Image: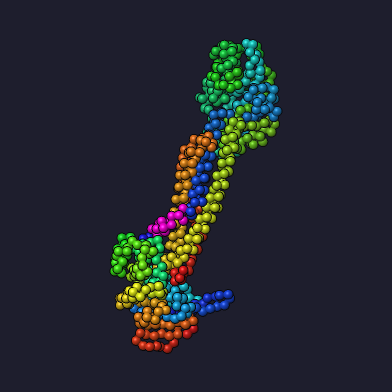
Amino acid sequence: MIQLEAIRKDYQRRGQILTAFACESQQIEDGEYVAIVGPSGSGKTTLLSMLGGMLSPTTGRVLVDGISLYEHSVAERSAIRGQKMGFVFQSFNLIPYLSALQNVQVPLSFTTTSASEQLERATEMLTQLGLAERLHHKPSELSVGQQQRVALARTLVNDPQIILADEPTGNLDPTSREVVLEIFEQCHQQGRTLVVVTHDPSVAQRATRRLTLVDGMLVRAEDASSNASPQVAAA
Amino acid sequence: MNLRSIIWHELKSRPAGVAFNSLTIFLGVAALVAIRHVTVHSEQAVSKQLTNLGANILVLPKEATLQDYYAADQNGGTLPEEYVAEIFLSGLSGVEQVSPRLNVSTELGGHPVAVTGILPQSEVDSLAAWQATTMFMNAADTGCCTKANVATSDDLKAPEALVKHRAIQDLDKTALVLGADIAQKLNCQVNDRLKLQDEDFTVIGVLPVTGTVDDGRVFAHLHSIQRLWEKDSTCNAIEIVGCCEDAAGSLVPQLRELLPEAKVVTISQVVETQVGVNELMAKTSWIVLAVMILVGGAGLAGSIASNVRERRREIGTLMALGATPGFIQKLFLGKAFILGLCAGSIGCLVGVSAAIIAGPVWAGVAITPLVGTSLLAIFAATVVALVAAWWPAHGAARLDPCICFREV
């Protein structure tokens, strides 16, 4: 479970303090599929970064399974991320000089997984995603859709409980987008927690809950089953 | 996949960049190793030459010239013999052998000859005993080399030792040693008797041909010559065998301070050119080292910093995937380590090869690889690379991982 407690993130620009995100309280239960929507600059990526333990809030706490992320050191947060979280990026962020297989092994290299097990698990994951013939291809030798599948394999190879995705379909054609959304559905069915930042209403529609951000505030929370709920938080 | 393989794949992906990044270090190490090899071998050659010279420092009267010494000219003035004792008593570091000489001219069998009075080492040793006492009272590390041509008492037993070691262990006050030319002119052999200033002397040895002025000299006991020519306790020159490095360094100034009324010279003109080349190359090697540290280090620091900038999103992604700041820092330090080690090793090979080829032409010495110098150069290159990369690597480790979400 992810909990936000009295979170606020301020930036200082030319002597002025700007609030990028503020929220009194918010909770994402285990196994939830949450879409975060809102216009550009509304604080979606700031929220995702704070959930991922990569951006310290100015005030407040982010708890993941009861662990207050920002009460730990940067190195400890990295370890927590490696164990519990997987990231999906809009531009896939594959390492260009590594093959598909090596890219998928990268998260495992931060753990104590042996080289043979790394190879086995990465191969299995890529095969599951239909990339058995592309194991030794560099990202530049893959189509955009294949690159995103390699990135998904890299996200899932560590078997993370929480998946944080930033515009995962932003750069994809409709077919590839559908493949990605199918995989997210499967992850959701496997009981993983998904937090997806998106501009795309059709992607948000697939989530079980939608949080709408405007000017750094959560203005609305909608369940898939209901049309709308009252404003959930205020700065 | 691990840290090493990530570094290795990244290096392999941009070979031209890697070569360019390490170019300054490679060139610096190559130049440094080549110069050091030539310098060290040249110094060894000089040392060998000094050793072969025997005496490498001369104490002469103020008004005398080196030519006077070589010509055995007694008109060059005299020195008190007690200077020998003073030299020993001062306990100077690097004095290995001291031999006073007095030259006089006379006629033997109608031939003009130079007679050189020498003090046998058995008598010098009794003076040297005082040196040990002085050193005991005023302990100083002599740090003496083993290269000086210091003879043992056994080496000096035969009269021929005068040729090689410029000294003789024992010499009776009525004994003579003849140079090869004068022995031939006088038709003299060992055990023949000769008269000097109407006093009888016995020839105890004839020196082999040396091709020097010694071939025309007659050697006798210093005190006999002093007595016969009424040169009370004086000599024309004091020959000193000093440690090679001391003779070329602090010993001469110390002797000058000790004996202000005398002229102290080294037989440096023989090796002057080579010593000059050595000094030049020693200075050049320091300049090259400084250039390698400054230019190579700055160049590598710049290229690693640029590499960090280019890979910011990759760094953010690795951090998002679980890499710790320590891992990121090691990623760049590891790269710098490989660059420094490889550039240093290849530079070292090229430098040694260049020295082997150019050494005989440049400095007239044959070069053999110096393992210690080579390893030290590689180590220095690696350390320079690591130090240069430390700050950019530290910066990379402190990058905001949120950069992975940004579109580039």
Q: Residue at x 53, y 50 (%)?
A: B292
Which residue occupies 42% across, 80% down? A37
Left/right placement of residue B345 relative to residue B74 reads left
Q: What segment carries the magenta color?
A: B5-19
Q: Would you say B307 lies left or right of A176 here?
A: right
Reply above or below: A144 against B134: below
Asked which quadrant contains residue A113, the reply is bottom left
State whether residue A158 appears in this view. no
Q: Position of residue B49 (x, y in %)?
A: 55, 31
Judge by depth and name the residue closer to the eye, B380 or A138: A138
Q: Position of residue B237 (x, y in %)?
A: 64, 26
What is the quadrant of residue B242 in the picture? top right
Q: Is residue B408 above or below residue A185?
A: above
Q: Residue at x 36, y 88 (%)?
A: A226
Residue B330: x and y in percent read 44, 60
Look at 56% across and 28% down and name the residue there: B54
Coloration of the structure image: rainbow
Q: Residue B405 location in percent, x, y?
A: 44, 71
